[in-house]
Image (cartoon, rainbow, N blue to C red):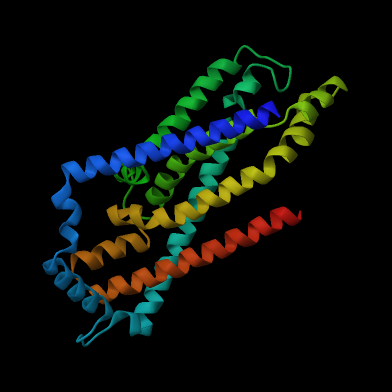
């Protein structure tokens, strides 16, 4: 009962604190950027918006890209390349995270979870946490710009940029998942003489696997959405062609690439939903 009251008070106080911060932020924007805030609703911007929409729809244009089968073939091929880049990115991020995530959980290095302490746990903890911090602190766009100094434009720098950023995010999420897990089944296994590998295979993995897979699928959906951004700076895929279309004011090409991007995001959402359903069933 006491734990329930503490949790309720914490949730209520957090809500009011969040509401207070949101209110202060909007008041600050209104007082300091009033002209910028309402400039978008001027009649001149309304005319520009109508003209932009007409160009996207190809009204009055002789060639409309999103009605041309040849352009669709090229765009779908680029979409497939972008999808492959996203799969490679989540694969790299997941493998890198799994290699170093367990020593970055405080209850592992302190011995609270496994009753086993090693002298090298704390150095690994700080090194791993530092790597996770660097990975998630640098945005995908900046990672892509850095990697383009070492690689030629293409899918590889885009995949690595997405992987490095999501490596840091996944590492933090899974490390906190390990810290918050119920350690009683693990302790019972240790008391009954289970080895380190038995604890790992039959205690930690079954407990962590469903939520970890949910985190991986969630980050995969975010990678699909971010792939357009890293492609804009030259990291290949659909985003690179999107940037070129904008540079040369090929508006109907922009519409075509946006439609392909929406199809790709929708397909990734369906795939993620199917995987999550499979996880729940199994």
Residue in front for this viewpoint, 123 or 275? 275
**Who's the residue at 35% across and 70% down the image?**
257
**Which residue is most to the right?**
192
Q: Where residue 16 appears, x then y in whole percent?
A: 44, 36
Q: Where residue 4 appears, x then y in whole percent?
A: 66, 32
The answer to whether any part of residue 7 appears in the image is yes
> Taking 55 as reference, is 7 left or right?
right
* 254 vs 60: above or below: above
**Who's the residue at 58% across and 62% down the image?**
271
* 29 vs 76: above or below: above
**Who's the residue at 36% across and 82% down the image?**
70
> Taking 129 as reference, is 44 left or right?
left
Q: Quadrant of the N terminus?
A: top right
Residue in front for this viewpoint, 164 or 48? 48
Residue in front for this viewpoint, 97 or 20? 20
* 199 vs 280: above or below: above
**Which residue is most to the left?**
44
The answer to whether any part of residue 101 appears in the image is no
Q: Where residue 239 appears, x then y in whole percent?
A: 33, 60
Please tell me in which quadrant of the rendered image residue 96 appears: top right
Please tell me in which quadrant of the rendered image residue 139 appears: top left
> Taking 18 as reference, is 42 left or right?
left
The image shows a total of numbered marks equal to 0
> Taking 277 as reference, is 266 left or right?
left
Please tell me in which quadrant of the rendered image residue 58 appears: bottom left
Q: Where residue 29 appears, x then y in whole percent?
A: 23, 43
């Amino acid at each position: 009962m006491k734990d329930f009251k503490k949790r309720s008070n914490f949730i209520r106080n957090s809500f009011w604190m969040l509401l207070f911060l949101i209110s202060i932020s909007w008041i600050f924007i209104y007082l300091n950027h009033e002209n910028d805030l309402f400039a978008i609703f001027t009649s001149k911007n309304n005319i520009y918006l109508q003209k932009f929409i007409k160009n996207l729809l190809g009204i009055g244009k002789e060639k409309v890209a999103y009605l041309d089968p040849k352009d669709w073939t090229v765009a779908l091929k680029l979409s497939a390349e972008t999808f492959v880049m996203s799969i490679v990115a989540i694969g790299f991020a997941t493998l890198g995270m799994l290699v170093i995530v367990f020593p970055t959980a405080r209850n592992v290095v302190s011995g609270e979870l496994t009753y086993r302490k090693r002298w090298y746990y704390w150095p690994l903890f700080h090194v791993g946490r530092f790597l996770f911090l660097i990975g998630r602190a640098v945005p995908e766009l900046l990672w892509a710009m850095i990697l383009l100094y070492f690689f030629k434009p293409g899918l590889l720098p885009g995949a690595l940029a997405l992987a490095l950023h999501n490596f840091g995010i996944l590492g933090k999420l899974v490390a906190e998942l390990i810290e918050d897990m119920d350690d009683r089944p693990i302790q019972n296994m240790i008391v009954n003489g289970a080895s380190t590998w038995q604890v790992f295979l039959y205690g930690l993995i079954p407990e962590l696997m469903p939520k970890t897979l949910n985190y991986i699928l969630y980050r995969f959906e975010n990678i699909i959405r971010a792939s357009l951004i890293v492609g804009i700076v030259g990291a290949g895929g659909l985003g690179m062609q999107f940037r070129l279309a904008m540079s040369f004011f090929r508006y109907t090409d922009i519409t075509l690439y946006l439609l392909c991007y929406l199809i790709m995001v929708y397909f990734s959402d369906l795939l993620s939903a199917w995987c999550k359903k499979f996880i729940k069933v199994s």
